[in-house]
Amino acid sequence: MENVIIRHSEQADIDGVKAIYESEVAYGGTLQLPFPSLERWASRLSNLPQGCYSLVAEYDGEIIGQLGLSVCDNQRRKHVASFGMGVKEAYQGRGVGCQLLQAALMLSDKWLNVQRIELEVYTDNEAAIKLYQKYGFVIEGEAKHYAFRNGEYANVYHMARLRSYAESVDNMRNTL
């Protein structure tokens, strides 16, 4: 998708971010709950702790995606970050997730000196798994009954991307 702007979220974006996670597809694919309150999202996005970043994808004035990135504050894990993201249902499969992920990886690699990025993804979310693998994430394990979702327990994969590995994959792609 062209003309998508990726930027840090602002106070005026809170309604748009809330709208992303109101969709059953979004809250069913994340750890969010249905019926998110505006107050909760306002509190979450207005008071980001140090080491936390919120990026949004904006298209034609509409917030269509959001990615939250958190760098670990534990002294021994300051080289590690994790993230979660959602894309508005009408815009899924159109490259918005790629653009958000690329921006988060650029921020992590070139500015925050993050060496390892971790995430959890439901094992049945094939589109997200393929997206993460495209950017060098690998499945490191599976957690059974990780979260309660839609009346039953769901499994997740633990995935991670090591910067040194990702750089070698990028170099291989560039030589092909």
Image (cartoon, rainbow, N blue to C red):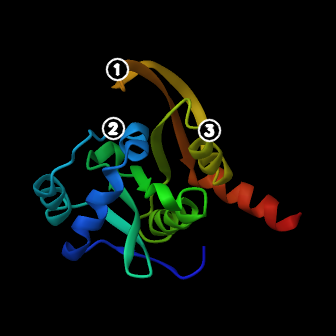
Based on the displayed image, in which of its 4 quarters is residue 99 positioned?
A: bottom right
- The quadrant in which the N terminus is found is bottom right
The front one of 141 and 79 is: 141
Q: Is residue 25 above or below residue 163?
A: above
Residue 52 visible from this viewpoint: no
> How many numbered marks, from 0 up?
3
Label 2, residues with CA under 10 Å away: few <14, some 14-19, many ≥20: some
Of the two numbered discs 1 and 3 in the rendering, the one whose residue sits closer to the viewer: 1
Q: Amino acid at mark 1?
A: Gly
Q: Is residue 130 left or right of residue 35?
A: right
Q: Is residue 114 left or right of residue 46?
A: right
The mark that comes first in sequence, 3 or 2, is 2
Residue 126 disc label: 3
Q: Is residue 29 left or right of residue 22?
A: right
Q: Is residue 2 above or below residue 20?
A: below
Q: Position of residue 149 (x, y in %)?
A: 36, 27
Q: Position of residue 76 (x, y in %)?
A: 33, 43
- Please give the residue where the numbered disc 1 appears in the rendered image: 151
Q: Residue at x 15, y 57 (%)?
A: 38
Q: Residue at x 81, y 59 (%)?
A: 172
Residue 31 disc label: 2
The front one of 116 and 103 is: 103
Q: Position of residue 90 (x, y in %)?
A: 49, 59
Alpha carbon separation for disc pair 1 and 2: 14 Å
Q: Secondary structure at mark 1?
A: loop
Q: Amino acid at mark 2?
A: Leu
Q: Position of residue 100 (x, y in %)?
A: 49, 64
